[in-house]
């Protein structure tokens, strides 16, 4: 599995995997919208830095800033949609995912259900589909 994943709105790095858990470090570009989407795993996000607004299933969160470093989101269930906006600085976060089947562990960028986040992301999704 590749360790770095690019989309049109982010760059992510797989930083740790053991058993049913996977941790990714996401660098979110400034002033972007990540449209509503879901993943086939349970997850939480840990805000590190920057400006980030998350929303999910009808709930809009608060803008997180550098003052909120270390904030951990509520658990996002498998298949539950969520979305993000970033401010003028972009944002940095960890995504911690828990997989029912550790053999299925993969990047959230690749295990993504929803409208692709631009041509780069579509190419990553196409590459995954072609490898099956």
Image (tube, helix red, strand yellow):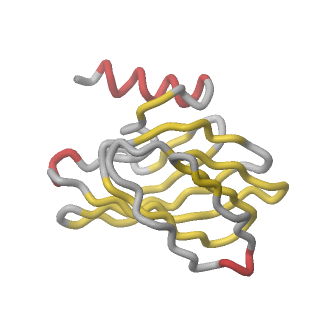
Q: Residue at x 41, y 32 (%)?
A: 113
Q: Quadrant of residue 1?
A: top left
- Image vertical order of residue 70 relative to residue 132, above or below: below
Q: Residue furthest right?
A: 88
How many labels sit on residues?
A: 0
Q: Residue at x 41, y 50 (%)?
A: 3
Q: Residue at x 79, y 46 (%)?
A: 31
- Image vertical order of residue 110 relative to residue 20, above or below: above
Residue 48 point in image, percent of width and height: 62, 72
**Position of 96 compared to 99: left or right?**
right
**Position of 94 compared to 30: left or right?**
left
Q: Which image quarter is the C terminus in?
A: top left
- Image vertical order of residue 114 relative to residue 97, above or below: above
For this rendering, which residue is in front, 84 or 21? 84
Q: Residue furthest front?
A: 58
For this rendering, which residue is in front, 20 or 12? 20
- Image vertical order of residue 4 relative to residue 95, above or below: above
Residue 37 point in image, percent of width and height: 49, 37
**Position of 7 compared to 16: left or right?**
right
Residue 72 point in image, percent of width and height: 51, 73
For this rendering, which residue is in front, 54 or 100? 54
Residue 124 point in image, percent of width and height: 46, 29
**Position of 85 compared to 10: left or right?**
right
Q: Residue at x 54, y 27 (%)?
A: 116
């Amino acid at each position: 599995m590749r360790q770095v994943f690019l989309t049109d709105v982010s760059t992510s790095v797989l930083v740790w995997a053991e058993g049913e858990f996977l941790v990714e470090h996401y660098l979110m570009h400034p002033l972007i919208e990540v449209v509503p989407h879901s993943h086939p795993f349970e997850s939480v996000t840990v805000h590190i830095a920057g400006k980030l607004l998350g929303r999910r299933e009808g709930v809009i969160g608060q803008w997180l800033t550098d003052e909120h470093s270390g904030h951990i989101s509520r658990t996002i269930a498998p298949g539950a949609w969520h979305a993000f906006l970033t401010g003028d600085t972009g944002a940095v976060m960890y995504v911690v995912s828990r997989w029912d089947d550790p053999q299925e562990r993969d990047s959230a960028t690749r295990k993504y259900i929803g409208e692709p986040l631009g041509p780069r992301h579509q190419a990553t999704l196409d590459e995954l589909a072609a490898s099956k």
